[in-house]
């Protein structure tokens, strides 16, 4: 299966932060969610993917190409949807189209008009009058209008109301059903990934924690609840993190079948959310509340 994005043993250091020996792949034709808390390296990774930063060491390839020799070709094939406004606010969307289309050899005015109509975007209002939701739709319209094969999204639903977030995600879902595209979706709103992500990449403190299929996460991970007396030196090894209280323990495991085998009916086993996995992994070890 072809990888659209590959990072191999990438290192990037800043004052107080380091992306350490970081490797990951993003497969063609799928939605990959990129998750992690604030300040763990998501934006740094995206800036490396976009060639806005260069690694201190390691290799980065997009569509099997490197930026040093193929930057123009790569960027022709990528669309960007960012949380921040990247347009000139004093211009209209029509005026922005005239500027942006010159940069792309595959620009398609018919496609641009199609998405403007689908998203009900005003062509002749200044962009500074756009709501957050309209701005996201405008960014996606521009990204799609030059037939981008890879759509990179950095917190696209941050600050959107729940109704519009769902509408935006429905658009992405329809896009993936009808087109051969790849979406790389960085977000801290992990519930947005429940209905759309095929794969999840989890990063914490500048390190790759895992890349897994969404279905694989459901099969392997579990929240386990039980009496504290069930915990000993051996059973504790089965958990990523354990939270103890006066009422018992609650823990995260990455081996649900093993827990079922060990404890049987003595514990309650529940499906974790992606947020649960992030929370317990970040907490680590064992703590008491």
Image (cartoon, rainbow, N blue to C red):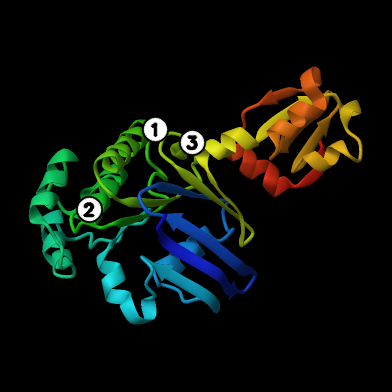
Mark 1 residue element: helix
Q: Nearer the viewer, mark 2 or mark 1?
A: 2
Which element is circle 3 on? helix
For disc 1, the neighbor class at 10 Å (few under 14, some 14 to 19, many from 20) is: few
Residue 3 found in image quarter: bottom left
Q: Is 213 on the left or on the right of 103, as rendered? A: right
**SS for dot 2:** helix
1 sits to left or right of 252: left
Q: Earlier in the sequence, mark 3 or mark 1?
A: 1
What residue would you read off at disc 3? 191
Distance Cα–Cα, label 2 vs label 3: 24 Å
- N-term mark: 2 or 3: 2
Q: In the picture, residue 117 is in which quadrant?
A: top left
Q: Residue at x 18, y 65 (%)?
A: 100
Q: Looking at the image, which residue sits at the far top?
A: 265
Tell me residue 191's x, y (percent). 49, 36
Mark 1 highlights which residue?
Answer: 162
User: In x, y percent, where is residue 168?
Assistant: 31, 39
The quadrant of the picture occupied by the C terminus is top right
The residue that mark 2 highlights is 144
């Amino acid at each position: 299966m072809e990888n659209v994005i590959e990072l191999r043993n990438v290192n990037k250091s800043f004052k107080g932060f380091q992306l350490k020996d970081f490797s990951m792949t993003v497969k063609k034709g799928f939605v990959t969610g990129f998750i992690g808390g604030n300040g763990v390296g998501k934006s740094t990774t995206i800036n490396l993917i976009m060639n806005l930063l260069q690694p201190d060491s390691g290799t980065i390839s997009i569509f099997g190409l490197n930026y040093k020799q193929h930057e123009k070709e790569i960027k022709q094939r990528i669309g960007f949807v960012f949380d921040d406004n990247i347009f000139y606010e004093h211009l209209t969307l029509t005026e922005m189209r005239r500027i942006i289309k010159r940069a792309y050899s595959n620009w398609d005015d018919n496609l641009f008009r199609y998405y403007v109509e689908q998203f009900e975007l005003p062509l002749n209002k200044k962009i500074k009058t756009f709501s957050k939701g309209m701005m996201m739709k405008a960014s996606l319209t521009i990204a799609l209008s030059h037939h981008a094969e890879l759509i990179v999204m950095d917190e696209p639903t941050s600050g959107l109301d729940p109704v519009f977030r769902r509408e935006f995600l429905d658009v992405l879902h329809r896009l993936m059903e009808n087109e051969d595209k790849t979406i790389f979706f960085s977000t801290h709103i992990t519930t947005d990934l429940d209905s759309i992500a095929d794969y999840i990449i989890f990063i914490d403190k500048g390190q790759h924690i895992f890349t897994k299929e969404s279905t694989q996460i459901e099969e392997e991970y579990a929240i386990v609840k039980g009496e504290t007396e069930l915990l000993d030196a051996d059973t504790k090894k089965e958990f990523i993190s354990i939270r103890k209280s006066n009422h018992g323990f609650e823990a995260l495991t990455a081996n649900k079948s093993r827990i079922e085998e060990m404890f049987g009916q003595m514990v309650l086993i529940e499906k974790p959310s992606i947020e649960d996995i992030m929370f317990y992994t970040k907490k680590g070890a064992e703590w008491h509340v």
